[in-house]
Each structure stands twice: as structure tokens, then as C-alpha cells.
Image (cartoon, rainbow, N blue to C red):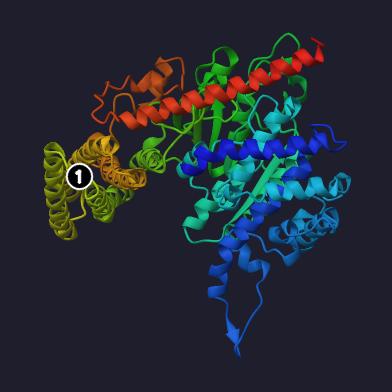
Amino acid sequence: MAQLENIEAIEKRLWGSADNLRANSNYASNEYFMPVMGLIFLRHAYSRYLAVKPQIEATLPSRGGVTRPLTKEDFSSKGAIFLQEKAQFDSLVNLTDADDRAQAVIDAMEAIEADYETLKGILPKSEYQELDNDVLGNLLRTFNDPALKKATGDIFGRIYEYFLTQFANQSAHDGGEFFTPVSLVQMIVNFIEPDHGSVIDPACGSGGMFVQSAHFIEKMHKNPQDVATFYGAEKNPTTIRLAKMNLAVHGLEGKIQKAISYYEDPHDFLGKADFVMANPPFNVDDVDAEKIKNDPRLPFGLPGVNKKGAVSNGNYLWISYFYSYLNKEGRAGFVMSSQASSAGGQEAEVRRKLVESGHVEGMIAIRSNFFYTRSVPCELWFLNKSKPAGMKDKVLMLDARNVYRKVTRKIYDFSPEQLANLTSIVWLYRGQKDRFLALVESYLTRTLEDAKAAKPSMDAFIASFDKLASKLEKVEEETSKAFELLTSDIKTFENTIEAENRDWEKAPRGNAGLLSAAQKLEPMAETSRDLIKQIDQLYKLIEKQAKQSAEKGLNKLIKEFDDERKEAVEQLKQVRYIFKQAHWLQERFPDATLRDVEGLVKLVDIAEIKANDWSLTPGRYVGVAPEEEDEDFDFEETLRDIHIELKGLNDEAVLLAAQIQKNFEELGI
């Protein structure tokens, strides 16, 4: 979460440096992002190298007191790449103005290409010779940002998307998205579980689908390169370079070819893919119908064709292609414009045939603001050519529009727990009750662990109070009573934790046992919320007295006290937050079996879909969720959201003012 909150600031810093590069070089705006992305590639590769190096060294065999050298195979198995010393970012950052930085960067790129055949000719090299030595030095220092050193996940893809947006290279976007939000990719991965064989993305962009698939396989304690092969298609040569760099950073290799997927199948994958994953461009309306009318990848025929001889909307071309790529046991998951699920005309006819095939497994509705560069809602489609016989005529409809976490004013995502909870519904659909119960059990275990972890922070808060109170001439009676009540309630809370922990160790782990355990833990979770209120009240009381006191040097103690308060409050919040995840699941699925939940999920049969014009829009079937009373109104959290909103508006205002001023200057006004 913290990384996501800070990503916008990181991006702006990086863009500022890139813009400085443009001002100090002969490059046009659509040319210079590749050398910039090359440096981000080196930075990210080095971060991953450093993260796994200690783990590798700890397991290296030695003979006669001599440990064998590190190899690239060691790093590939850990999702990273091996870097010779001259390719390590620190070596480049430490160069002086007397050194030839451009040649050093080129040497670094060549060293990596020498070790990794798939990167031959991919990494930027000659571009750096056009840059002034001091400009390149500034760039290297900028990309040595501490935030980038700690970056995890597909940050490379995310920053890439940001740069493309800033460059306003609309011809590269095609109205779609290069960077698919990680939450959506993870949801797709969790649903189709691409754990073996061929994984194909015919609109692969920066390769995020492959990266998240590899992470999924790694969690199974397998090497992605041993069990899966990644195949991609992309029409833009620059994008292909970026995708290969993104895969390489994560220790992966992929067979990515240049192709326009509307007209080409470069990997000859008709009927062969184990998994298809994609986020294709939405609503494209200029595909030549004549060129594809006999394409074997269109088993349900062409969607609508306009008077110009072009397909009216390319959405159902993509859907048909994805379907046709799958082998007899293949599964597909992809992002699609929300309008596609209920589109009329010839598109509805294609959708009818698709539904009647019995291979549509599920639909998930996603609210707006998940995409980085667009605010549109979307849906995730899931196809499965090996659906169980009992599910052949049914489709899982899941409306996740009310499930989200606000990251910034413009960006929402799923928290890890929300993602797990949505995934657990898929498990119940597949009859995997044990996985559902294991998730509930993990939440109850974490509830107790977080409650125990709250003790040190509460003790520190109490100690900090004593320290501040000792500096005051007198502590008011109301404050003293609040303090006494809080210390008593904390003691009771800690005793309850010990008792509940003993009971939990003996509790049966079946559904009935977990329901009973949750019922017993609920009062403790509610107490954590009450303690937060008491802690906040005590802080306000003593702060008021301290600020009114004539004693000197209290401001530092007040700040320390506030810091201890925040830490204690955050830890106590976590207790109830995690418990509520178990409650969310048990309340909706008390028997640990799939059932219809108003406003969330419904297993719909084909007869009902037919009665609804073959619509695959989840909201049409699941109904509207009952309005829930907000028992957890959090004033500080609300203020945080308002602050995010205000900061975003202020940032936009500054950018608009600068643009207006620039426009005036260009007009000579």
C-alpha cells in the first residue's frame, strides 16, 4: 500500500529528469524514453539482484573451503538476473565526471546481453552516446532513488505506462492499456491458475501477465521456466523491447513476436494453448473485415461489419481469438470493455454461440478507476474448455464493483485480503472447500497474532504518557481517570488474548469449529476498536493540558507521544480488520459452500442468460447489495481520503496553470 501511495511522487521525479534530458539533447519526445527506460531497467534489475543474492550465497556449495562462484542459473531460479560487476547500478552511479558514462552504460548493457541470449539487440546502447556526460550522471543519480531501490512487483511496467502517457504517444496506445493494473492481473491469474504449459498473451504490452503468472508459479515452489513457456504478440517494436526487458528483470524468458494479432497468429496457436491471458485494446473499429472473414480463429463468425467494410467493434474478434487458441483443456482470462457483455446486433449473436458452447466459466464486474490512465469500468471474462459436466450450463456471475480500496484520488485497487476473498468464491464454485476454510483459518490465526503484537505498542504508549505526565505540574482528574480505565482495559484485553489463544490451539478446524472460534473472537476484535477510541481520547486530553502548560520542552514529548499513539492505533486497527475478513466470508458463505449472495455472486444457468438477451453482465443477475450500516466510520481515514482528493486537485491545478502559461507564451501573449 505504501509503495502504491508513493508511486505518483516517484513517477513525477523520474519524469522531471527525463524532461531535463529532452531539454539537454537532440532527442524528440518519442525517442528519448528508451534510454531512460534502459536506466530504469538497470536499476530494477540491480534491486532484484541484491534482494536474492544473500539467499543464493547462503546455499552455495563449497569444496576445500572454496565456495563456487555465482551463476546466472542461480538468479533465474529466484526470479532475477545475474549482473556482472560492471552491470551493477552502483558501479555506474559511482562514476565521476572524468569517466565516460555513456560507454560504461553501453558496456553494462553488452555484459547483460552476453549472458542472456534473448536480450541480444534489445537493450538500448548507442542512444547513450548522444547524451552529455553530466546529463547522464544526473539521470543515474535520479534513478538511484531509494524508493526505486525498494520497488517490488511490476513497477517497471507501471513506470513504463506512465512514461508512455506523458509522451502522449497515442499511436502506441491504440486506445488500450499497456500496463494492466496488478490487481486485475492477479485476479485473472488466481481464477485460471496458469501453472503449466503454454501461456499466451496476443496483446502482451509490457508483459505484466507473464510476470504475475510467474509469481503464481513461484508461490507453488516451482521454477516458472521449468513448467511454463510464455508466448506474446505485439505490433510495436519498441513495446516488444520493453516487454523483453520486463521479463528479463524478473529472470524470465518469453517468445514475443512482432505481429498485428487481428490478422496474424505468429505462434500458430490455434487450438494449442493451455492458457490465454490478455488486456486487449477496447472498442477498436477499423479492422478490415475482408482480411479476416475466413480466419479459422473466428468459430462463431464475424461480428458486425460497417459500411466501410470494417468490423464495427473489435471486442468480439479478440474474444473469438482467445477462445480459438485454447486446447481441449485450456482456460482463458482477459479484460474487456464493460459494454461488450451486453452488446447487441451481430455481437450478441457471437455471444449467444459462445455461451451455448458451455465454455464461459465466469464473469467479474470491476468498477471504474482501476486503470491507471483511464477511469472506465470493465469486466473480466473467463473461459474454460474443461468445465466439469455439472457446471457446463452454468456461469459464475461475480459483481466486485463494491469491493475496492482507494489508493489515490484516481486509482483504486484490491487489497491483498479483498483479492483473496474474491478468489475464495471461485474456490467454492469449484468445490474446493478446504481452500476456503484454510483462508478463514489464516484470518483467525492472524487476528490473534495481531492482537498479541499490539501489546508492545500499547506498553510504549503508556510509558510515553507517564513520561509526558511527569513533566506536568498536575494531571487533571478526567485525564487520570481515563488513564486508569485504559490501563485496566488493556490488562483485561491482554488476559483475553492469552485465554483465546489457548482455546484456539485446541479448536477443531472444520467449518463448525471455525464458526464457533470466530464467534468467540469477535468480542476481542470489538474491544480492539474500543481501545483505539480510549487511546485517542487520552491523547487529546493530555495534549491539551501539555499545550496549555508553561513548562518548556514539551513539544518533543508530545510528538513522541503522538507517534506512539499512531503505532498502537494502527496495530489495533489491524486486529479488527483481519477479523472482519473472516467475518465477511463466514457471513456470506456460512456453510463453506457456494450460494447466491445478493449484490455479489450468483451461479446462473444458460436458460436465465437466454432470457436476458444472452447478456453476460453480472449486475443484471446478482441484484443490488443491501446497504450496510457503517459501524466503522473512521474520522482519520476520512480526512486522509479528503487530503488525497485535495492533493490531487492541487497537483492538477498547478499542471494546468503551467500549461496555460506555456500556451500564452507560445501565442506571444
Q: Residue at x 29, y 36 (%)?
A: 547
Question: Residue 181 at what x, y percent from top left?
Answer: 54, 36
Q: Disc 1 on helix, strand or loop?
A: loop
Query: In the depicted view, which residue is nearer to us: 468 or 366?
Result: 468
Residue 534, by quadrant, is top left
Q: Residue at x 68, y 46 (%)?
A: 142
Question: On the picture, is 574 further left or further right than 37?
Answer: left
Name the residue beneath numbered marker 1.
473
Residue 164 higher or lower than 38, as above or below? above
Question: Residue 45 at what x, y percent from top left?
Answer: 66, 55
Residue 449 higher or lower than 188, as above or below? below
Question: Residue 359 at what x, y percent from top left?
Answer: 49, 34
Q: Which residue, as the protein is rendered here, is positioned at the far bottom?
A: 64
The amino acid on which the numbered mark 1 sits, given as a three-letter code, is: Glu
Question: Residue 193 at what x, y percent from top left?
Answer: 48, 47
Residue 538, by quadrant, is top left
